[in-house]
Image (tube, rainbow, N blue to C red):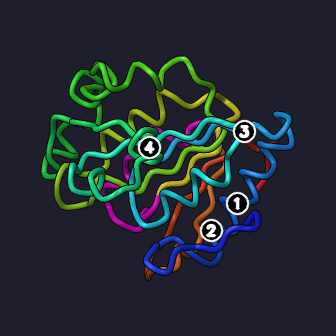
Amino acid sequence: QLGLAPDPGQQLRGEVLDAICHQFRLAQGRNASRANLLIFSLGHDSPMWLRMNPHGLTRFVEDSRAWLDMQPPDVRAAAVLADYGHHWIEAYGIRCDPGRLGHFLRSPAALQLLPVCWDVVIIDAPDGWGAGRMGAIYAAAQLASENTVIFLDDCERMAEANFALWWLARGRSMRAIDNGHGGLTCMMYPSEVGA
């Protein structure tokens, strides 16, 4: 994985980690070793993502103050704290409500994310039983360009699958990948980029 070892505590591993690293290397090849990587999550793997992109831009979006506080200073400096303004139980009621889904994008924390052309986006937060990933999925859809490759973890869950098809898959090819911890990650990519 680009000369970096995965953290033993990280969840994304195996096939999905290989796929993310492959897309990341492709982006670096297109952009003179500079890639823009946006990750909706902080975890044990966050320092690895930051180290693998020393010449590019890596940003994290996290809704949990506890996960933010446990990160090393360089990761904390690259992270924004998100408030999505909804709960997973509302998923189907807000699917077509950009006003509710866009709560985070209208926040001051999101301003630094807006002017960037993101090459790879990973959505692995919020958890599926608190805020839910609806706002993160909607934000990723709004921040992605036509060339962005998006990875959505736990897409075997109903809400994630529904929102992926509704907001992320339009005009993109999609494939499901074993996520290394008992579920699936959906990779959505422009056909010309390839899997």
Q: Residue at x 41, y 48 (%)?
A: 73
Residue 135, horizontal then vertical, whole percent: 30, 38
Amino acid type at mark 1: Cys
User: N-terminal of the two: label 2 or label 3?
Assistant: 2
Mark 3 lies on a secondary structure that is loop
Mark 1 lies on a secondary structure that is helix
Report which residue position mark 2 lands on: 17
**Secondary structure mostly seen in the magenta stretch:** helix
User: N-terminal of the two: label 4 or label 2?
Assistant: 2
Q: Which quadrant would the N terminus be assigned to in this image?
A: bottom right
User: N-terminal of the two: label 4 or label 1?
Assistant: 1
Amino acid type at mark 2: Leu
The answer for how far apart the CA atoms under marks 2 and 1 are is 6 Å
Report which residue position mark 3 lands on: 55
Query: Taking 127 as reference, is 99 above or below it?
Result: above
Cβ atoms at labels 1 and 3 below 8 Å apart: no
Cβ atoms at labels 4 and 3 below 8 Å apart: no
Q: Residue at x 43, y 67 (%)?
A: 44
Cβ atoms at labels 4 and 1 below 8 Å apart: no
Magenta-drawn segment: 153-170
The answer for how far apart the CA atoms under marks 1 and 3 are is 16 Å
The answer for how far apart the CA atoms under marks 4 and 2 are is 17 Å
Q: Nearer the viewer, mark 4 or mark 2?
A: 4
Residue 21's disc number: 1
Amino acid type at mark 3: His
Query: Taking 31 as reference, is 187 above or below it?
Result: below
Q: Residue at x 44, y 82 (%)?
A: 182
Residue 60's disc number: 4
Q: Nearer the viewer, mark 4 or mark 1?
A: 4
